[in-house]
Amino acid sequence: MKTTVSHIWEKLRTSFWFVPGGMVMVFGAIAFLSLAIDDHWGKSVLDWMPALKNVSASGVRSLLSTAGTAVLALAGVTFSGTLVALTLASGQYGSRLLRNFIRALPNQLALGVQLGTFVMCLIVLRSVRDFGEGSFIPHISAFIAFIATVSSLAVFIFFIHHISTSLEAERVVGSVYHELDESIDRLFPTGKSARGEEAEAEAERDTWDAPDDEFVIRSNLTGYLQAIDVAGLVELVVEQGPGVRGRVLAHAGKFVVEGEALLAIEGGQPERTGPWLECYIIGIKRTPEQDFEYHVRQLVETALRALSPGINDPFTAMHCIDYLGAALSKVASRRLPDSVHEDAEGIARIQTRPVSFNSVMGTAFNQLRHTAIDMPDVSMRILEAFANVASACDCLESRSSVETHTQLVASILEKDGLADIDAESIQERLDRIQTSFRV
């Protein structure tokens, strides 16, 4: 249940309508509340603020009409500016980074304040009456609408500043790393790695198939596995009996086809597969809810696009490599995500596919290593990142992974025939990595 709620919240947060829609309703509620205050306590407030008495019904109408027209025009400019930013970001950084721009709270707040103010002006405007004894001039509501209009102007100025700076490469890469850092904190427990943890995880990744004697739950959909309700699977396994165990065969982020094995059950055979399949959320794209590699791939994609001949921006690529090295250094100093999940009595019930440090290293640097063949400066930056990661490793297996990737980069550079000064710089970085291994 918690996984489903988290998935729904993630979809709402990455939609461009949720926050503005909620703010429109809030501003509408404020408008009705202010009208009720005008109706019940308007005279008392006017006695306290006599300057409002001088405003006629036609003046209030003119104010609200002008304010509503102005903020609606601002909302149109805000929406157009957002679309322009999305177009530029898609061409420069890739379409998968559009999620970061769509979910940016300043953009949503700016549009929400402006549309909310427009709705407030309409609600208050329709309540103005200036005929006979039934006249009603909502002075308090009009004043609140005026304040909201001024606030909309301030928010619009802030939006222009935000949209102008949000396209800077450093900010784009930094925002992706910020989410990656949060994902590391959420998925990787603090503390040093257990002895042999990395070796066991790497060995299990190579042999993770369902034996013929186990009951297999198969996918009824085709798409990317976005999230797995492990707690729900544990409850279902417990219902099957004390000797039942389960192994999650597909990890979050994997593309599964209809009929592919998702879960292998040992010691039991469920009558219905429906409840088990409800623990798997499958969609048309990858999401970062439980997929740690999602943000890693975003940084890699940004770096690869920067190194492409059409863009040719090695500095952005090196910026991405710096952050990849920082993320891998943090992962190297922590334990791997738990792959064994127990029930309330402490009995192991569900085992998930383990994540190894070596696989994360491969995801981060395999493509970059090959793309940077003809760019010694980028390769040097990769080696610098390796040196930082090596100094953070707390087990021999992790250091061995870094050493393997270092040798792969070095072998490519040796074949490339570097100039003497480049060869010296490369050797300095290789020596630094070896020094980190000896610390």
Image (cartoon, rainbow, N blue to C red):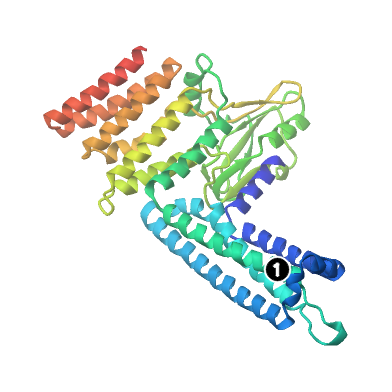
Q: Quadrant of residue 387?
A: top left
Residue 21: % across, % down: 65, 62
Q: Is residue 222 above or below residue 177?
A: below
Q: Mark 1 falls on what kind of element?
A: helix
Q: Is residue 234 above or below residue 299?
A: above
Q: Image point 28% across, 41% down: which residue?
A: 371
Hey, which residue is sitting farthest bottom in the picture? Answer: 132
Q: Quadrant of residue 271?
A: top right
Could you say which is closer to the camera, residue 165 or residue 371? Answer: 165
- Tell me the amino acid under the disc marked 1: Phe
Q: Badge 1 local density, few (<14 within 10 Å), some, or many (20+)?
A: some
Q: Image point 45% across, 51% down: which residue?
A: 97
Residue 13: % across, % down: 60, 51
Residue 354: % across, % down: 53, 28
Q: Mark 1 points at which residue?
A: 143
- Asked if residue 48 shows in the view, the reply is yes
Q: Image point 17% across, 25% down: which residue?
A: 424
- Asked if residue 359 shows in the view, the reply is no
